[in-house]
Amino acid sequence: MAQPRADAPSKIILAESDLHRVVDRIAHQILEKTSGATGTVLLGIPTRGVPLAHRLAARIHAFEGVDVPVGSLDITLYRDDLRLKATRALGKTELPPGGIDGLRVILVDDVLFSGRSARAALDALNDIGRPSSVQLAVLVDRGHRQLPIRADYVGKNIPTALSESVKVTLTETDGADEVKLIGGLT
Amino acid sequence: MIKHLRSAADLDAETATLILDTAAEMAALSGREVKKLPALRGRTVVNLFYEDSTRTRISFEAAAKRLSADVINFSAKGSSVSKGESLKDTALTLQAMGADAVVIRHSASGAPHRLANWVDGSVVNAGDGTHEHPTQALLDAYTMRSRLGRLDGLKVAIVGDVLHSRVARSNVLLLTTLGAQVTVVGPPTLIPLDVAAALSEKTQVSFDLDAVLPDSDVVMMLRVQTERMQDSYFPSAREYSRRYGLDVPRLHKMPEHAIVMHPGPMNRGMEIAPEVADSPRSTIVEQVANGVSVRMAVLYLLLGGK
């Protein structure tokens, strides 16, 4: 994927307060769609899916007092482009103590794009256990799917051109909460 | 990322730390029910063993298989080597078969370096003569880090037959790269002074084990390599054991937190007393388990990417 230049024009899509509202809304939607988030586990996909999963769990707890277990699921070894790029360092895979067998797993990621990360995550899940069902929550859906994959919870749909890129930054990993659209013609 | 792992000197601190961190993730993944990972699907790893080995060969085989690579085991016994085939011709055969990585153990120091000129794939040194054994050094460093929490500033004593030990050489190189302070200990006949000095300015040499023990975080005992002892390096096995063997009284001289390591195979009663080898402060079995994770990390980092 061609990356826009570092000095390419950028536009803020979600500022800090918008991003917080979006996370709040996804937390509410999870509660609504899963009837109170019982029997549910949130698994963040490193890097930025992990802090997002923790935030969702914290908001769900704040709204309804339910403790949703949170974990992380590294998909590096399951990627289909592993040997097309230089070797990548591995992220952390940490399952909650209760595991995932028989539970509803909600995968959490920052951006949904080609759908290949979600596919890799499904393969990785397969080797770890047997959840009763799997859902996908993303902060941003930027379109351009290459696989038949869709998200169950979407923070914001951002129509993009392939030449553009979406950059999510979070306080935990990058020092600030923001979603930016970089590159493009304007 | 580097292409070959022929020597511990191929690794700078950053790459070595990446391997240890990756090994930690691999170890975490090994605890689950399905241990197989798809990262090296369709890749071929050849284990080319000209010298006897139990744990290293099995460990490399397990590591490659857990990453879904196809493994071809080759041992000199029962192959065309016994008909006189040279290393180069064997290498060209492997090249023709499309090996993505060759893990080689050879009795000649430098064999992996030669091999790397003849094959396109990655070459991993699994022990060459009295030269080096880098993956052993990596798994030792990994074991120290997981037991003691750090490597920087750690005081490590490597005790015994330093002259013939590829494990010692690779450990000295790797551990000093990672900031540990290494002291090699043994009878003067088994410590090549010039070599120890050339290995690293940071390495110290001592002939008195009892003086080194109270100030060591790690005591690594080396095997007395009877197969390489044609000359008389020490008067008798018993005298060696008295002066340089790790027995229970010596174990008590070590600090409370200090650990005992041994690369195996052990000569129980010679360089290490059975009570010490089986004590909770010995990491010998742990080292074997960590070997698989470390070798998975090495194979993944050498072969996983472009």
Image: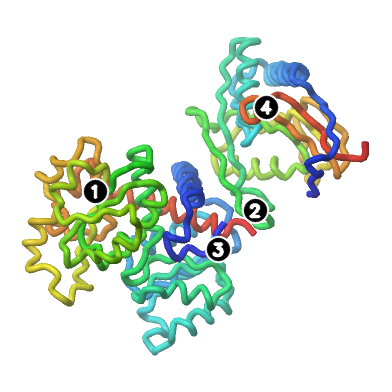
Rate crowding at label 3 as few (under 14), some (14 to 19) or many (20 or more) other CA atoms within 10 Å. Answer: some
Q: First in sequence, mark 2 or 4: give its number.
A: 2
Give how far apart the Cα atoms at labels 2 and 4 are: 26 Å
- Measuring from the top left, give residue B121's x and y in whole percent: 56, 69
Query: Which residue, given by chain and number where applicable, does mark 3 sit on?
Result: B3
Q: Amino acid at mark 3?
A: Lys
State yes or no: discs 4 and 1 in contact (Cβ < 8 Å).
Answer: no
Residue at mark 2 shares a chain with residue at mark 1:
no
- The type of residue carrying mark 4 is Leu
Where, by quadrant of the figure, is residue A167 drawn?
A: top right
Q: Residue at x 44, y 45 (%)?
A: B27
**Label 1 sits on residue:** B219
Can the viewer see residue B33? no
Viewer-nearest of discs 2 and 4: 4
Q: Which residue is mark 4?
A: A170
Give the Cα distance between marks 3 and 2.
Answer: 16 Å
Q: Which residue is mark 2?
A: A82
In this view, A76 is above or below A22: below
